[in-house]
Amino acid sequence: MGFQSEDEDSAHLVNEVIGNTNLPRTPSKLEVTYTHHHILTISPLKVSNDDLTSAVQNLTSAIISNAPGRLVPAQVVPNEIAPSHSSASSPPPSIEELMVNDQLVIYNAFTLPDPPALSYKVHQIEQLVKDWSESSFLIINGIGIPISFWQKLYRRTRPNVWRKIKDQWLKYKFIVGGFQTFENAEKFWSHMRLSVATQSDKEGGERLNMKVICKILREDRAIEDNKHVEAAKREFENFTEVFTYRKAGKKVVMTNPQDVARLYRKHKRIAVYWDEELESDGEESEKASAT
């Protein structure tokens, strides 16, 4: 059996592994990629696919056992970004880094798995609040990733996945933010029950569920926004100069209460969870940017 090698050490290694193994008569090229890259041309003596398979397995084992470094478990490649044979020459996806509770998570589009499905009912809101910052439903490289980090993981690295989970994630973020504005769970539920009772007197009754919780929180948000709109008009004598935006190249005074309130809070350095919600998803209102 004869060998031609680009690396004398590799040829010696292959001689030790294959020995007197009989292989097909037709010369075959075996390409092995590990820490270094070697291309070996094997001139076999006997035709046998089983022998060739065995030789390849033995060669692979020997190279791995003699090469420096360590084995890394293979990652499942998501269907949406699995490369085709025709794109083999394309550059690999960029490596991303994210600090999660003082642990560095390294990933890319190939190694980032699909997020698990989530579902919370109204009686599970307190569990949602806990899972938001402490859960491990999603695990990357042995590190549990709480739900609050999912947007940072998926939004740019796997945008198609982010579009599928975005609405639910933002809804849960809004509920968690609303819950955390209360001193404790008892005050949160007391406020929700009182709000439902008040609406029941006006509208004929509503059951407390996730949809109603979001409705109540939006009403609370509108009340707070209106207070800040009034404060902006009262405190800024040059209101029509400060609270403006540009439209078709012209300066226009803001009229949307949410935009006015948000810009007021920006000037006053007042933080509310729903402003953070808009900023975190990159959907800042055009009117909320002062000229």
Image (cartoon, helix red, strand yellow):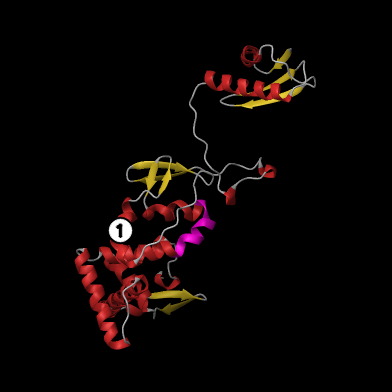
Counting labels gives 1
Where 167 sits versus 219, above or below?
above
Residue 269 is at least partly visible in this image: no
Q: Classify mark 1: residues with Cα within 10 Å, few (<14), some (14-19) or many (20+).
A: few
Magenta-colored stretch includes residue 160: yes
**Percent position of residue 157, x then y:** 51, 51
- Position of 47 with respect to 247 (left or right) is right
Where 83 sits versus 6, above or below?
below
**Percent position of residue 110, x then y:** 54, 44
Q: Amino acid at mark 1?
A: Gln
**Percent position of residue 271, x then y:** 28, 64
Q: Main secondary structure of the magenta part?
A: helix
- Position of 199 with respect to 2 (left or right) is left
> Which residue does the numbered mark 1 point to in the structure image?
127
**Percent position of residue 258, x then y:** 36, 75
Q: Secondary structure at mark 1?
A: helix
Magenta-colored stretch includes residue 225: no
The N terminus sits in image quarter: top right
Q: Would you identify the image quadrant in which residue 36 lies?
A: top right
Q: Please state which of residues 277 and 111 is positioned toward the viewer in this rendering.
A: 111
Please report the bounds of the magenta region as a residue range.
Answer: 157-167
Q: Please state which of residues 22 and 223 is positioned toward the viewer in this rendering.
A: 22
The C terminus sits in image quarter: bottom left
- Position of 172 with respect to 68 (left or right) is left
Q: Please state which of residues 71 and 283 is positioned toward the viewer in this rendering.
A: 71
